[in-house]
Image (cartoon, rainbow, N blue to C red):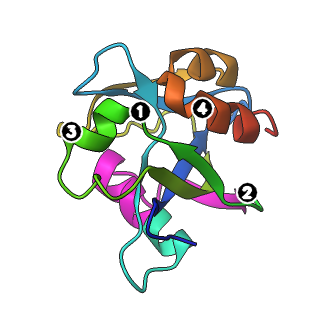
Amino acid sequence: MAGLFFRAGVVIVVRHPDLEHVMAFERVDARGSWQLPQGGMNEGETPIDAAWRELMEETGLGADQVDVLAEYPDWVAYEWPDDLRKGKPGRRDRIGQVQRWFLFNAHHEGIVPAPDGSEFVAWKWVTTGWLIDHVPEFRRAAYQRVLGTL
């Protein structure tokens, strides 16, 4: 699904056992901006393998703390704002991301992720509505589309 203009990636929703909250992470480069773990797919990597890898890299969580429950049936795309497109090498020829979204359930409410420090600095359990309000504007429609189905 990736192409010349969109980077293929994954997004991981970790849901609390109460089924009403999800795990949100604060970005290191944009304090006050929260999002879900996400990342690009490596060549030859399946979306679910990328989801497990990104979850471990960014949060330290693995199969002993979470189970994968579902995959959103469609690729979800969004465009980067101009400042992000121009600000990083390798993005100049791309206009955004197209992602597969995965829903994971936490085994218990006491799991504690370890934000990687390079992308995320903090985490907390939040409602999906709160997260949609605190995600960067350019990602908001994608978050509404998928999180609205939970």
Q: Which residue is mark 3?
A: 87
Give the Cα distance between marks 2 and 1: 25 Å
Say whether marks 4 and 2 touch (CB < 8 Å).
no
Three-letter code, disc 4: Val
Secondary structure found at label 3: helix
Residue at the spot 23% in from the left edge and 27% down from the top edge: 28
Label 1: few (<14), some or many (≥20) within 10 Å?
few
> Could you tell me which residue is drawn at 37 percent across and 81 percent down?
43
Q: Is residue 103 visible?
A: no
Lower position in the chain sequence, tag 4 or tag 2: 4
Q: Amino acid at mark 1?
A: Pro
CA separation, marks 4 and 2? 16 Å
Residue 21: image location, x then y, percent: 65, 27
* Eye-nearest disc, 4 or 2: 2
Marks 4 and 1: which is nearer the front? 1
The mark lying in front, picked from 2 and 1, is 1
Residue at image mark 1: 81
Q: Is residue 58 above or below residue 73?
A: above
Tag 1's secondary structure?
loop
Q: Amino acid at mark 3?
A: Gly
- From the image, tell me which residue sits under label 4: 22
Residue identifier under label 2: 72
Question: Residue 50, relative to residue 109: is it above or below?
Answer: below
Residue sitting nearer the eye, 101 or 16: 101
